[in-house]
Image (cartoon, helix red, strand yellow):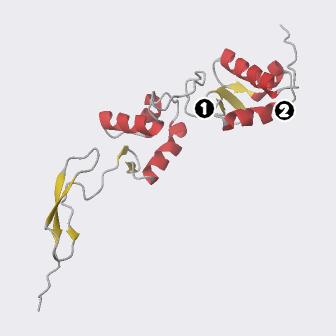
Amino acid sequence: MAEAPVDLSTGDNLEQKILQVLSDDGGPVKIGQLVKKCQVPKKTLNQVLYRLKKEDRVSSPDPATWRIGGAASGDGAPAIPEDSSAQPSLDERILRFLEANGPHRALPIAKALGMTTAKEVNPLLYSMRNKHLLSYDGQMWKIYHSRQEGQDIVLPCSPGCPRTHHVDQAGLEPTEIFLLLPIKFWD
């Protein structure tokens, strides 16, 4: 079945054709197949694909392979604009998964997010580690806990201030902090 060539006078028509081909196929599509189905030069096709990739409407899981949806869409589902209040971010989903299931390797985390390989989730995991949200022991990812967790926080203070302060932080239990006063002998 021969398809009519796409009118290149507007980029929107080519974008729509690319998105149509990617959604009809349902999975990753090689660039050669896109060139045949869209009937446009590879250079023009790549320009539009990379523009769509910047907008997170398509992703490239492998070289010269494209699929609909952003990098986080591992199941080939169409990209649906996410309402930030409706769906939690990937960071939040990873934290919830690890909180509920304990430490895991990257592959089970990726599968829980709808991805197929650990390679897809690793950049996000390392980014979260750099933000001190996760820790990694070489095999397992877990929620980061400070080494001082459970210890009293002791802060030095100047003479005249009370020895304890009530601290109330959002999301944490209210606690009392005992302050160390420097020992000075006053004249």
Q: Name the residue: 14% across, 85% down.
A: 184
Which image quadrant: the C terminus? bottom left
Q: Name the residue: 42% across, 33% down.
A: 108
Question: Residue at the front extreme?
Answer: 160
* Numbered disc 1: secondary structure: loop
Q: Name the residue: 54% across, 39% down.
A: 119
* Label annotation for residue 24: none
- Density class for disc 2 (Cα within 10 Å; few <14, some 14-19, many ≥20) is few
Q: Position of residue 64 (x, y in %)?
A: 73, 33
Q: Name the residue: 43% across, 50% down.
A: 129
Note whether 28 is above or below 91 in the view shown.
above
Note whether 116 is above or below 149 in the view shown.
above
Note whether 12 is above or below 152 in the view shown.
above
What amino acid type should be assigned to the residue bearing mark 1? Answer: Gly
Q: Position of residue 166 (x, y in %)?
A: 18, 56
Give the residue number, with chain letter if any, for mark 1.
Answer: 70
Instruction: Tell me: 61 left or right of 134.
Output: right
**Between 37 and 19, which is closer to the camera in this rendering?**
19
Give the residue number, with chain letter if any, for mark 2.
Answer: 44
Instruction: Tell me: 84 left or right of 41.
Output: left
Q: Position of residue 6 (x, y in %)?
A: 85, 19
* Numbered disc 2: secondary structure: helix
